[in-house]
Image (spheres, grey):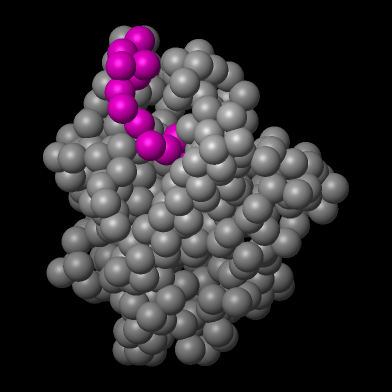
Amino acid sequence: MRQLNILIWHIHGAYLTAITSTQHNWYVPTRPEGGEGYAGRGLDSTMPDYVREVPADQVQNLDLDLIICQTPKNYQVDRFDILSPEQQQLPVIYLEHNTPEPHPTNSRHPAADDPNATLVHVTYYNQLMWDNGQTPTRVVEHSVAIDPALRYEGRRDEGIIVVNELQRRGRMAGFDLYEQLRKRVPLTVAGMKAQDIGGIGEIHYRNLHKRVAEYRFLFSPMRYSSLPLAVIEAMTIGMPIIALATTELPTVIENGVHGFVSANIDELADRMQYLLDNPDEAKKLGDNARALAQRRFGLDRFVDEWNSVFLDVVNSSESINSTASSIL
């Protein structure tokens, strides 16, 4: 397909790195004061050179084909603040990363019933649970763009959690479970403000997975979340997963094959200790996890699916505009 000019806000750095593997002209807005979505490429970015920063007050000068929103603020405020009236008529994709809030089944999506938007969910669970109204929806499952040469080592007799601001996010992110389980098994956490709760702190994305690979297993304590990218990243390098059997994860991790999932915390603690005591078994489960990640969450599949979405959205918009012009 032809290269498109796409505007996207910097909301999730890891996901932005993956989606910009589609070789289009990507523009990320910046503001001197920063703020949600305006960090540009980010510090020491690993994204390709065709991902360009543009000052927010110059976005109106761009010849754009497509707008991608990822938060209610992007959708309800930002696009009207920085886009010209003509740009505001361009096709919009709302990329939804999160599970519904405040209610798991009765929350209406901000883009529900918008005839000019396409709503793309990152899991089928999200698509199922959100009230999407009449807005057309698609699902493009996750992928990650990390060094393909990285491999699991598992030499540390310890598990690791990778969650930003775990304490602030509380029970939803499983902070209480981390506090319980680290009294029973060696367990640490990486991410923003992790050092405040006894963890190893924030690690730049460029170096994160090499450090994570040292640990015996990755634990995802998230009670209610979309499929965490940390899980996909760990699987991609060949690491076994232990996680709560909630949301999309039971469709990904098969017990005794890729790791273990359960809603029973005692059972999870026992499985953690099992992997600590049996590094060869951990390696075998990690190999299976990596094979699954290559099949289900491979970057080539992800790029192809996103390009298909882009093509459908842009072609549909062009067809509607052409019909309108012929009527006029």
**Residue 54, position in %: x, y?**
27, 21
Return the residue nearer the eye: 188 or 140. 140
Residue drawn at (45%, 16%), measured in percent from left and top? 84
Residue 79 on image: x %, y %: 51, 23
Q: Is residue 190 above or below residue 229?
A: above
Residue 172, percent across and down? Answer: 67, 47
Q: Which residues are magenta?
A: 57-71
> For residue 250, which quarter of the picture?
bottom right
Residue ID at (78%, 48%)? 133
**In front of the other: 298 or 289:** 298
Residue 224's place in the image compared with 302, above or below, is: above
Residue at figure coordinates x 35%, y 83% from the top left:
291
Quadrant placement of the C terminus: top right
Can residue 116 be seen here? The reply is yes
Pick out the residue farthest to the right: 106
Question: In this rendering, does residue 160 appear at all?
Answer: no
| For residue 8, above or below residue 212 | above
Q: Nearer the viewer, residue 186 or 110?
A: 110
Taking the magenta stretch, the answer to whether it contains residue 69 is yes
Q: Is residue 62 left or right of residue 267?
A: left
Q: Position of residue 102 (x, y in %)?
A: 78, 40
In this rendering, the count of numbered labels is 0
Q: Can you say which quadrant of the picture contains the N terminus?
A: bottom left
Examine the rendered structure and indicate whether residue 55 appears above or below residue 286: above
**Residue at x-position 74% and y-position 41%:** 113
Q: Is residue 129 left or right of residue 179?
A: right
Whether the magenta-drawn stretch holds residue 33 is answered as: no
Pick the front one: 194 or 114: 114
